[in-house]
Image: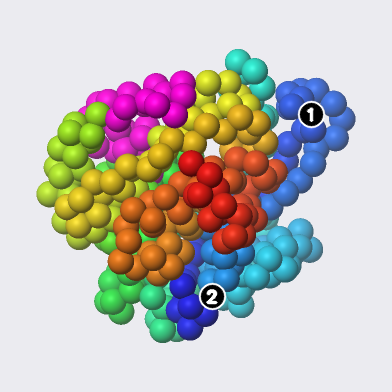
Amino acid sequence: MTQSQKIITFGELLLRFSKDQHQRLSQGGYFTSLYGGSEANVAVSLATLGNHVEYVTRLPDTPVAHAGVQNLMQLGVDCHNVIYGGQRIGTYYLEPAAGMRSAKVVYDRAGSACSELQPGMIPWRQILKGAQVLHVSGITPAISRSAYDAVFEALDIADEMGVLISYDINYRKNLWRYEGADPRQTLKRMLAHCDMMFGDAIEFEWLCQRQQPPFTATDTHFQMQMDEYREWFDELHAEFPRCRKWLMGMRNMVASSRHLLTALLWTDGELLKAPIHDINGVVDPSGVGDAFMAGLLHARSAFPDDPQRQLDYSLAASALKNTINGDFNLGTDEEIREVMASV
């Protein structure tokens, strides 16, 4: 993707707190902190790969929020469209997985500046002028009714301006707490707007209410049930015909530090599969889905006529993210290509 192209990502910047050495939240006396958030993660990954990417959010006018913006800017993300207001930045607490113990996430986002977004606050026509892509996720409409309205304002204006819409399902059941919230219908409504999308296998199954063939790989020789997946994706596309690229990530956690990872890409009627990556030595799987989506956004221009390489690049970017601490995928294009060549 050339520097002349412009990608916009829109969502909430978060401050992440966790304990060192795989301690539980109840252990130890100190938290470490990092910035993250799905759409910010996508922006950082795209910037690391050399893309012109602008991040849009709402933050309080506080030193902690400004430090987060500075962090993104240092990593190459254009933040001049961040707006300020409200009282607090959203946070979350992460207890990492260890052995047979699963990871745990505790959100503290109620009343955050981004949750108080209202339609009309963000000058979308100005921001989207000259943009090729708007990337959104299902997290933002989950945090409040007014944020829901703000998301669909952005989607409607992007449609009006002919901007390609990229979408990550990002279903977070613990966020949908406001009166009248309907996560499945909301995320389907977003899907009807999108041109390309990502979700993990569990999210696809939840959204479509259809059971899929299980991904139970314990090595790289696992055989995918491609005919069943092809039928499934064809039905999805019939329901949502606008979407031309459907990327589904699939993971089997053999242990907290060993994951088997692969992906499928349905594109213009063709279903492709990626090789299985056996990642032994997982450091931090946070943001793996965001690395997938950023990889596809980059690869669609890096390999415009080769959807198989687009898929393989996306998967390699996601696999590499597992080896990097924090939410951000700081893997370079050279490193991602090396991972692609290694399988």
Q: Find disc 1 in the rendering and name its residue.
A: 21
Q: Position of residue 54 (x, y in %)?
A: 54, 72
| Residue numbers of the magenta segment | 199-224
Task: Measure the C-alpha gap from mark 1 to mark 2.
Answer: 36 Å
Displayed quadrant of residue 52: bottom right
Could you tell me if residue 40 is visible in this image? no
**Snapshot quadrant of residue 281:** top right
Answer with left or right where residue 23 lies relative to residue 114: right
Relative side of 46 to 32, left or right: left
- Is 111 colored magenta in this rendering? no
- The numbered dot on residue 52 is 2
**Residue found at x 72% / y 49%:** 34
Please report the residue visible at 39 percent of the width from the left and 57 percent of the height from the top: 310
| Callout 2 secondary element | strand
Q: Is residue 133 above or below residue 148?
A: below
Q: Amino acid at mark 1?
A: Gln
Relative to 10, residue 261 above or below: above
Q: Residue 302 appears at what percent x and percent y? A: 43, 68
First in sequence: mark 1 or mark 2?
Answer: 1
Callout 2: 10 Å neighbours few (<14), some, many (20+)?
many
Residue at left 36%, top 35%? 201
Q: Residues within 10 Å of mark 1 (few under 14, many from 20)?
A: few
**Where does residue 35 sit, x and y in percent of width and height?**
68, 52
Under mark 2, the amino acid is His
